[in-house]
Image: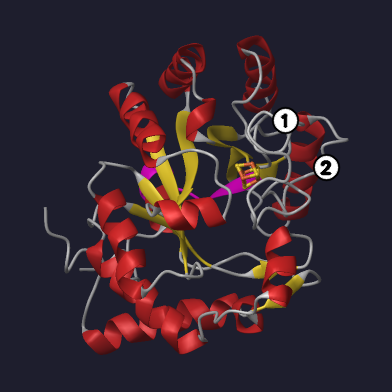
Amino acid sequence: MKWFDKRYHTFDYELKETFGQKVIKLSLDAGFTCPNRDGSIGSRGCIFCGEKGSGDFAGSRQTSISKQIEEQKNLLSSKWPNAKYIAYFQSYSNTYAPVEVLRQRYEAALSCADIVGMAVATRPDCLPSEVLGLLEEYSRKTFLWVELGLQTIHQKSAGFIRRGYDLECFTKAVSSLRERNIRVVVHIILGLPGENEKDMLDTVSFVSKLGIWGVKLHMLYIQRDTDLYDYYCAHPFDLFTYEQYINVVCNALEMLPPEVVVHRVTGDGVKELLAAPLWSLDKLRVLSGIDRELERRNSFQGIRWNC
Ligand code: SF4
């Protein structure tokens, strides 16, 4: 089974099939905060969350949304002059504000030229019914998905990363979004300390049964602007080697249903801030390693998917 030349259902494939042309995500910082940072749930955030609220490659929050979009489009237009774009509300929790404020920010993005969809990254505990209603409204108007950072199903690890919500909260949020026909993308971190491969694949298996639209698989990496870095310095623990990660991520891909869109199979650390693992900076090597390993196994996404 193949998705263009890949043995897994890539995001790029999905966008080309859906839109019939090049579509690029523009990462935005809409100026929101997060209950895990503003003191409502916690004040230091998730242990791996950096200064930019998990939006390291997003635009500047000092800049208007339309300006962020314009700036990023300008950078991309010489390479892809006819591309369309998805407005990706990435930094912090992008449903953590009154509905009128959310509407204003979403409209600011969708009213820009060539924007054909919207992605909203948030927490499952930031989806009250009025926000779900707003998202449902937008899902009828545009190509919308909502991203939730689950990372793990295991409570011990969730406590370690200071996630601040339980698994039930997550599953309820996924159900509420799915009832409204809103696409859901779930983030999973592979390689959290204290988890073995079975624990990681249990998370993948659990998520794969929720009827979600997509996943993002990240390897755990350590940036210097996070509390995780301080912890790692004080209590060093093993991180994946390149070979180990390729093996685990291929096992995870085999367990995902073929229709689940794989948005990401590697981490996205900032070069200047990344402490470890340094091999993760070479994304092309990781991607080609995954391709080679799936080919070596004569395998593909879904080969071990079992309802
Ligand atoms: S929920 Fe997201 S923005 Fe909030 S602390 Fe965690 S990673 Fe950072």
Q: Quadrant of the N terminus?
A: bottom left
Q: Percent x, y for residue 265?
A: 46, 66
Q: For disc 1, does the CB lie below 8 Å from ligand 1?
A: no
The quarter of the rendering in which ligand 1 is drawn is: top right
Neighbor class of circle 1 (other Cα within 10 Å; few <14, some 14-19, many 20+) is some
Q: Percent x, y for residue 166?
A: 43, 39
Which SS class for mark 1?
Answer: loop
Which SS class for mark 2?
Answer: loop
Mark 1 to mark 2: distance in Å? 12 Å
Left or right of 2? Residue 136 is: right
Query: Which residue is painted at 63% across and 33% down in the image?
Result: 41
Left or right of 50? Residue 197 is: left
Residue 272, picture quadrant: bottom right
Give the residue number, with chain letter if any, for mark 2. Answer: 60
User: What amino acid type should be assigned to the residue bearing mark 1?
Assistant: Phe
Residue 34, picture quadrant: top right
Give the residue number, with chain letter if any, for mark 1. Answer: 32
Query: Which residue is painted at 27% across and 52% down in the image?
Result: 206
The reply to whether the C-beta atoms of the residues labelled 1 and 2 are less than 8 Å apart is no
Closer to viewer: mark 1 or mark 2: 1
- For residue 15, the mark is none
Left or right of 121? Residue 290 is: left
Left or right of 244? Residue 235 is: right
Magenta residue check for 29: no
User: What amino acid type should be assigned to the residue bearing mark 2?
Assistant: Ser
Q: Percent x, y for residue 25?
A: 59, 47
Note whether 100 is above or below 247 in the view shown: above
What's drawn in magenta, residue-wise? Answer: 16-26
